[in-house]
Amino acid sequence: MENVKHKVLALKYRPKNFKELIGQDIMAETITNSIKSNKIPNAYLFTGIRGVGKTTTARIVAKVLNCKNGIENLCNENMCEHCEGITNSNHMDVLEMDAASRTGIDDVRELIETSKYNPTSAKFKIIILDEVHMLSKQAFNGLLKTLEEPPSHLKFIFATTEVKKIPITIISRCQRFDLHRVSVKDLLINLKKISKIEKGNISEEALKLIAKASEGSVRDSLSLLDRALISENAEQKEIDVIFIRKMMGIADRSKFLTLIDLIFQGDQKKSISLLKELFSEGIEPANFLNDLLEIIYFVQQTKSIGNSNSELNISESEQEIITKISNKVDMTTLIVIWQLILKTLDELAIVSSPILSLEMLIVRMVHLKQIPDYENILETFKRNNLNEQDNKTTVDINFQKKKVINEKNQIEKVSKDQIKNITQTKPILSSENIKNEKIKSFEDLIVLSSKKREVHLKYDLENNVNLIKFSEGKIDISFNENLDKNFVRNLSEKLFEWTGDRWVITLGKEVGQKTFSERKNIEKRELLEQEKKGKIFKKFTDIFSDAELLEVKKKD
């Protein structure tokens, strides 16, 4: 029996020139124009996720620089000796090194030593370093000088998936190109073309699912297509979307929609039963959760903008179901469910039986509406004597997994520019606002300014004034550079208008207290830290592990 060696599709259909490269048109055009105009950099750096064509692009650039026929007539079928050698990875003047396995300074020194000699036959000697981020610090340092001032015959080409791990001193010496994820549409076109050449009997819906599952990687899409075509049975039946789902451990989307609908109906028994059915069909737990996130995203999109607006191939019947679900659920519930699913994804790495985590997720989602709101939970804690703070605080909990909001951003501020645009209306004189107000403290003054709608004055009192001393009829203050130049005059007029007395306002040389806003911020931070140590917050985090304490307010 003749032994025919199978060549994987990812290698068989590897692009040989820029025209065959998928989804990187701008990069290809830029490099082509730079070579045509003889503006060739010392080094190229190609970044991007796996399978988008970084190493392939590096080889194409090497061919473009050395092809005997020039860039305009780059070899395709009948290749010159240089293009053929580069394609087969055996050209003497194009050195490829896997930086993941050769990471040390000695390996780099060897390359540099070799690079000193002129190319044997090609125009340029080219060094291609794949996964360059794996090089050691010493190796990178060894490259610096040669990279900045290489011999005229030498060019470097780097490829990496982790550009942030490369020293900035290296990046600054390279011409960087970021290769983007390839769109589902472009992947689908490529898959259709290749499956036709390979005479594969596969449906378009199956190809769409492969394109989507590839997440923008051309290599991944071809690997999945290869798996599917190899799996064709003797009867040569069409490979449909059901087969592809089973092959990749992905459940039917309609079943997910049914599951979500049952969850929002509160039917725990049927929800768990459907979950077990999906699990018995071979669905991977991680795929299950990611597909669940996708459905929740579709529901959110429909609720927000009226449709899912996605290129992920949602049928009209599926969109109808998603619309019905979106009408049954509020946005807060969707946000909480999203966080619960993400938490379960983290749990998969530590649990011995993933199905248990999935079942508990379903239970939590079914009973989500039965969880009392914040105020009810607080009252329950109070009744059980779990509050250590004499019941004088209320707690706001944010379910979203965000960073704690900067305290300064929680205080609503009016900018100077805004204040200047506000038309101040003089108060109408009446028995309510003339000569009958009592101001016994600096805080009383701020409250009265707010009551009288003196926005400008209130803002300066809170943010730009440092109180030194306050007594009835006299105020000693210092101030910062942002204080309005007419502040003293305005304050004096308003105090006379409100109290009927002339007040003495002294600008002291002492530093004074912190501003009112600064003192309030400090107080808030202290309350936050105090409350985080209490039993109330601990009880919340026991129920909602992602809960975060944002604000603590004193009860009046």
Image (cartoon, rainbow, N blue to C red):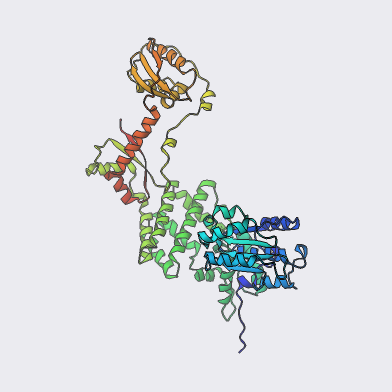
User: Can residue 278 be seen at all in this image of the molecule?
Assistant: yes
Tell me if 142 is positioned left or right of 534 in this view: right
Quarter of the figure that contains the N terminus:
bottom right
Q: Residue furthest left?
A: 385
Name the residue: 64% across, 58% down: 43
Q: Residue at left 44%, top 53%?
A: 338
Q: From the viewer's perspective, is residue 464 above or below residue 531?
A: above
- Seen at 72% across and 68% down, the residue is 122
| Point 36% across, 14% down: residue | 474
Residue 376 can be seen, yes or no: no
Location of residue 94 in the rendering, given as x and y in whole percent from the top left corner: 66, 68
- Pinpoint residue 164: horizontal percent, then vertical percent: 53, 55
Specify the quadrant of the image occupied by residue 315: bottom right
Q: Is residue 189 left or right of residue 449?
A: right
Q: Nearer the viewer, residue 237 or 175?
A: 175
Place residue 42 in its image quadrant.
bottom right
Left or right: where does residue 170 sit relative to residue 359?
Answer: right
Q: Is residue 518 above or below residue 216?
A: above
In the rendered image, residue 178, in percent from the top left (x then y), is placed at: 61, 56
Task: Work out whether residue 128 or residue 476 is closer to the camera in this orientation and state it.
Answer: 128
Is 176 or 338 nearer to us in this picture? 176
Q: Residue furthest bottom?
A: 1
Foreground residue among 56 and 111: 111
Find residue 367 and report its horizontal and vertical position in percent: 35, 53
- The quadrant of the picture occupied by the C terminus is top left
